[in-house]
Image: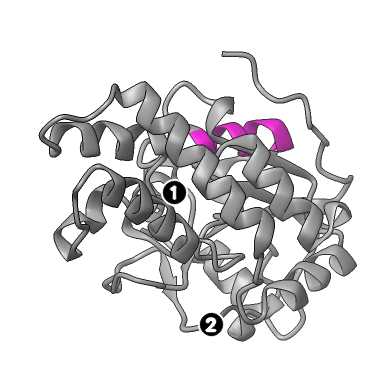
Amino acid sequence: MMPHQDTTALPDGAQARTAPESAGMALPAAVLFDMDGTLVDTERLWWDAVETVARNLGRTLGPEDRPDVVGRPSQHTAAYLASTTATPPSAGALATRLDETFTALVAQEVVPRPGALQLLHLLAGQGIPAAIVSASPHRVVELVRERLGRELFTLIVAFEDTTVSKPAPDPYLEAARRLGAQPAECVVVEDSPVGLAAAEAAGCPVVVVPSTVPIDAAPGRTIITSLEEVTLPLLAQARGSER
């Protein structure tokens, strides 16, 4: 699969920056953001899209369906719906229907999570590259990027850019590769267990902002309740944390 050609190298000296009030600790070489539920409140829209498609199949979603919906790409959720519905269309047709329904909802409503825009502007002011790393398709990620500010992101890695998506580490490894950074030098910001698994498998320290599912503390994780809590010292501390 050919990667999306939106690449920008790290600025010179990025890895040498230090955070104020952080006792000389280095800032991350880049901050890699999950999108749905982390930067914007689209996790709810994704659930609504899946719920709509499932309802048309005569199926009602419940809490037991969350592990196969939240943080998952449409192909995974489509295959799951196909396997748990009596007479479904093909998984491919379901994935297309899910993508179209989700895209229409996102086009109508993009709500940044509290603190998201402030954090993105803080990173831009420090010259720290920010990337969106998402299991959503390119057309949805580009919609969100435009709404938040295209200039705030160095690059995006969407579903089409890797052969496998989250919870595999490939999307975060691809983002780090394009930025010319080691995964351990980057900080990932995630909200779901699926995305957290991908980031940790890639070897990235993670700032976790749980949205719909509680996440336990563990080495290498910095757990907060809102992006409003993120500061340069916190990012430096997260980069320096060890698993």
Q: Residue at x 31, y 40 (%)?
A: 77
The colour style of the image is one colour
Q: Residues within 10 Å of mark 1 (few under 14, many from 20)?
A: many
Residue for badge 1: 199
Is residue 183 left or right of 223 when viewed as pictured? right
Q: Look at the image and tell me in which quarter the C terminus lies.
A: bottom left
Residue 14 position within the rendered picture, expressed as x and y whole percent measured from the top left: 81, 52
Is residue 94 left or right of 104 when viewed as pictured? left
Residue 208 position within the rendered picture, expressed as x and y whole percent measured from the top left: 45, 69
For the residues labelled 2 and 1, the Cα–Cα distance comes to 19 Å
Q: Residue at x 61, y 56 (%)?
A: 106
Q: Which quarter of the figure has residue 85?
A: top left
Residue for badge 2: 226
Q: Nearer the viewer, residue 94 or 114?
A: 94
Instruction: Using the rendered image of the protein, determine whether residue 130 is visible from the camera's viewpoint.
Output: no
Q: Residue at x 63, y 84 (%)?
A: 228
Q: Look at the image and tell me in which quarter the N terminus lies.
A: top right
Describe the element under mark 2 as helix, strand or loop.
loop
Q: Residue at x 59, y 78 (%)?
A: 227
Please tell me whether the stretch drawn in magenta is mainly helix, strand or loop: helix
Residue 35 position within the rendered picture, expressed as x and y whole percent measured from the top left: 57, 56
Q: Earlier in the sequence, mark 2 or mark 1?
A: 1
Q: Nearer the viewer, residue 236 or 77?
A: 77
Q: Residues within 10 Å of mark 2 (few under 14, many from 20)?
A: some
Q: Is residue 37 above or below residue 185?
A: below
Q: Amino acid at mark 2?
A: Ser
The span picked out in magenta is 171-181
Is residue 115 left or right of 214 when viewed as pictured? right
Q: Amino acid at mark 1?
A: Ala
Please say whether residue 90 is one of the residues in the magenta stretch. no
Q: Is residue 116 above or below residue 11?
A: below
Q: Which quarter of the figure has residue 20?
A: bottom right
